[in-house]
Structure formats: structure tokens, C-alpha cells
């Protein structure tokens, strides 16, 4: 059974409609809200989803690919990610009924990609209501540092900032101590 999760940027009602119409054999679909992941940071629910046997996510959040940590999390967890079209916010302009129609039409293609795509692959669906797997765009993977290297670099910057704050506090303490001594001396 291949598990596909739709994130909270896609209405849970659309996922309910898909279930009502019927999901292809061997596919299980779920929504972040029904799994208790509403409002959780993407990195956290992605990790929990993978640990629970998840394989593919469909997200209406185009910023997810632009956030390096989220994008690297998707890749490092080997989750297949599928994005509706972004061109000129085409998908968002459809409104709830258009988005429902679009995703229901594309569900067979999503169901085909989820179990067969290379682990960690990302795809962008085209802005058309005619589902055709040959028109799905495979997005480039990130080249460069690993997720753990990026996380460690951020942690090092945070430690450095805290150290700088302590130094500044020490300097402020010295300045206030010198001011107190000056006040006592002049009094």
C-alpha cells in the first residue's frame, strides 16, 4: 500500500471527495488535518509521515521548494513530492471547486507516480485539466550540502550569535559598572 499525504495547503474536503469517488487500488490517501498534523512545521510532519511508512506528498505550498531546509528534508527522507502548477498562481486562481476538479482529474497520474517514481523525486503537474503523465515536469534535485550540514551550519550560527550576545552583555555590564564608579567618585 502506497501512502500519499495531501498537506493543509490543499483543502481536506478535496481529499474527502477523492475518497468518495474511489482511490486506485494499492493507494491510500490522507490529509494532514485528519492525521493531527495541522499547524505543525513541515519538517516535523514530513519526518513523522516518513517514519509511519509514507511515500509521497502532494502540497499546495509552492514555497516548500523554495525553503532550503524543507526541500532538503523532502529529498533526504526520500519522499516523492508533487506540486500543482505555479505559473502565475494558476492553481490558486481556480478556487476551491476548480482545485477539487483539477486534483480529482489528476489523481490517477499522482497514484501512478507515487509508487514508481525515484525516491526523493519532485514533480510539477502542468496547468491543464487533461491528465497525461508525459506532461508532468520532473524538478531538479538540490546539489550541494546535505541536510545535516545545513542544520549544523545554522546551529553554529546560532551558537555564535548567543556568544556575541554574551560578549555584548559583558561589555554593557562593564559600561554600567564604570558609570556607577564614576558616579560614586564624583559624589
Image (spheres, rainbow, N blue to C red):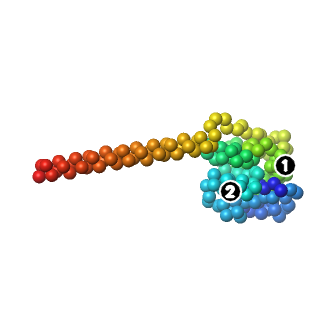
Instruction: Say which residue appears at 15% left-offset and 52% top-offset.
Output: 184
Q: Please identify the quadrant where the N terminus is shown.
A: bottom right
Mark in front: 2 vs 1: 2
Instruction: Say which residue appears at 86% left-offset and 56% top-offset.
Output: 26
Mark 2–mark 1 distance (CA, rounded to whole Å): 23 Å
Q: Position of residue 68 (x, y in %)?
A: 61, 43
Which numbered tag is attached to residue 55?
A: none
Q: Dot 2, how many residues are within 10 Å of its Cα: few (below 14), some (14-19), or many (20+)?
A: few
Which numbered tag is attached to residue 48?
A: 2
Are the residues at dot 2 and dot 1 in contact (C-beta closer than 8 Å)? no
Question: In the depicted view, which residue is nearer to us: 74 or 109?
Answer: 74
Q: Is residue 97 visible to the viewer in this orientation of the structure?
A: no
Q: Position of residue 120 (x, y in %)?
A: 73, 44
Q: Residue furthest left?
A: 187
Q: Secondary structure at mark 1?
A: helix
Is 134 located above or below residue 15 in the figure?
A: above
Q: Position of residue 167 (x, y in %)?
A: 36, 44
Q: Secondary structure at mark 2?
A: helix
Instruction: Say which residue appears at 70% left-offset and 48% top-offset.
Output: 77
Q: Residue furthest top?
A: 144
Instruction: Say which residue appears at 66% left-offset and 47% top-offset.
Output: 73
Question: In the depicted view, which residue is nearer to us: 122 or 158?
Answer: 158
Q: How many marks?
A: 2
Quadrant in which residue 30 is drawn = bottom right
Q: Position of residue 123 (x, y in %)?
A: 75, 43
Amino acid at each position: 500500500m502506497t501512502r500519499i499525504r495531501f498537506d493543509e495547503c490543499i483543502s481536506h474536503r478535496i481529499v474527502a471527495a477523492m475518497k468518495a469517488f474511489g482511490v486506485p487500488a494499492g493507494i491510500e490517501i490522507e490529509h494532514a488535518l485528519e492525521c493531527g498534523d495541522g499547524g505543525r512545521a513541515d519538517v516535523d510532519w514530513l519526518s513523522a509521515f516518513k517514519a509511519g511508512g509514507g511515500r509521497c506528498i502532494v502540497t499546495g505550498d509552492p514555497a516548500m521548494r523554495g525553503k532550503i531546509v524543507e526541500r532538503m528534508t523532502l529529498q533526504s527522507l526520500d519522499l516523492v513530492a508533487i506540486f500543482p502548477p505555479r505559473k502565475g498562481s494558476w492553481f490558486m486562481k481556480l478556487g476551491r471547486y476548480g482545485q477539487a476538479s483539477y486534483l480529482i482529474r489528476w489523481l490517477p497520474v499522482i497514484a501512478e507516480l507515487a509508487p514508481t517514481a525515484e525516491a526523493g523525486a519532485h514533480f510539477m503537474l502542468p496547468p491543464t485539466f487533461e491528465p497525461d503523465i508525459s506532461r508532468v515536469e520532473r524538478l531538479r534535485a538540490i546539489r550541494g550540502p546535505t541536510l545535516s550540514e545545513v542544520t549544523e551550519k545554522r546551529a553554529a550560527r546560532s551558537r555564535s550569535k548567543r556568544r556575541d550576545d554574551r560578549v555584548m552583555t559583558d561589555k554593557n555590564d562593564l559600561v554600567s559598572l564604570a558609570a556607577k564608579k564614576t558616579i560614586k567618585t564624583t559624589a
